[in-house]
Amino acid sequence: MGRSKATFREFLVAAVANISAICVGLTVGWPSPMFQKLTDKSLSDNPIGYPIVESEQSWINSVLAVGGFFGPFAAGFLADWKGRKLALWLSGVIHIVGWIMLLQSTSVPLMIAARFVQGFAGGCILNGLTMYIGEIASDEYRGILGSFLQIGQTIGTLYVYLIGPYVSYISFQWICCAVPLLFTILFFYMPETPHFFVSKGLYLQAAKSLMYLRDGSLEEIQGDLQLTKDYVLQEESLQKSNALRSLFTNRANLRALMISFCLISLQQWSGIDCIQSNSELIFEKAEIALPSEVCTIIMGAVQVVFVCCVIFFVDHSGRRPVLMASTLGLSVVLALLGAYFVMDSLDVPSQSISWIPLTGMIGFISIYNVGFGPVPWAIAAEIFAHDVKALGSMIIVSSSWVLDFLALRFFLLISESYGYEWAFWIFALVCAGAFLFTLLCVIETKGLSLQEIQNRLGGGGKKVEEE
């Protein structure tokens, strides 16, 4: 088998699938430039007809996470019933519906409804994409391809930052709608995962899927096909009960759920979406010399560069070292940002601390995107056994949206009532907790097959450090 061609096919399919992640990034970053238009007192580019107030901004922003809670349930059911591919493809269609609703929004309730639909689609994508990538990737490149999800989201956010401030409201919704439209067209031609075909007894289709992904003949992919059969059939034979019972009674499944749930939960409370959605507001509050939209673009560009860097070492350095270094660095940077707002309130000479806000925000985005952003999702894509993958992914993705909603509401409440410093310090403590959790509880999955990961999760005899 030609390794270079096989690698190209895997990366091509993963890249097309992760256009859906760009869609999620668009919706996360959307409030930053759009709120500038919707709060402008001149009403020069406001379809609602009046400047929206803070409570309306809060709901338009955070309702995305409410919709995101429900999406994974639909995607998980459909992924097990009709396949990972269809579940992910339909998520793109729903995203298109959300952008069309925003085009028609002439009131705040309609805009909230549109954002709910987009959040629902985003929840479907995060669940469906995690399963899809985990099952089409070879053991050698699973970590890299799992990191594509975070890359896609950061590209979507930068897309919003670059274009949103400089085009009209209506034009911007059309420009954003083009992305899920492109995804639905291209992804239609991508293969279903071999694991799903095997689980349905469709071995010929599974072989064809592997032949495409590995760019090999039927004889050349027999080894991969047999490993896929052994993995799926062994997991199903071990678990005769339903997926829900298996998830909570089997040691390996429960440990996989605990690790992925805690990592994703802590990730949501690192403050990432609060900073991305309110970046222009934060820069204005910090009184940066540069225009707030320019600072936001710089931050968005830096995060794309750094999240792309992770693919060069996530499968060489391992998941745990990258996670620990990232979470420790985030704790320091967030504590520094909190200290800045305290010093600013104490009237410390601005020239001595003016470097902190932009440097700190760029530092936060950089460190997050080389570790704590992509790696938890890469782990979630590979850590669940086949028979509980859909349910496990559904639980962690739904939980992540609930926690994201609470974080967005919490950030506005704390920053308005007690100051930005307290919000940043609490996020710093969360990241410090993530460092300790990774050190004590997260297993290393670098270079392991899906079956070897399950064996390690169920072993329990080794210490995490030895794993």
Image (cartoon, rainbow, N blue to C red):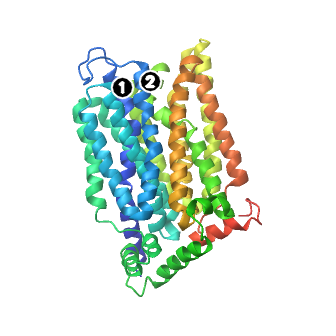
- Per the rendering, the mark at residue 18 is none
Position of residue 28 measured from the top left corner of the image (x, y, whole percent): 41, 38
- Per the rendering, the mark at residue 281 is 2
Q: Residue at x 25, y 30 (%)?
A: 169
Q: Earlier in the sequence, mark 2 or mark 1?
A: 1
| Secondary structure state at the residue bearing disc 1 | helix
Residue under numbered circle 1 = 35
Q: Are marks 2 and 1 in contact (CB under 8 Å)?
A: yes
Which amino acid lies under the numbered mark 1 shown in the image of this protein? Answer: Phe
Is 49 located above or below residue 73 in the figure? above
Q: Residue at x 50, y 64 (%)?
A: 142
Looking at the rendered image, the disc whose residue lies closer to the viewer, 2 or 1, is 1
Q: How many marks?
A: 2
- Is 77 left, or right, of 407 in this rendering? left
Quarter-of-image position of residue 218: bottom left
User: Can residue 151 be seen here?
Assistant: no
Is 249 located above or below residue 449 in the figure? above
Location of the C terminus by quadrant is bottom right
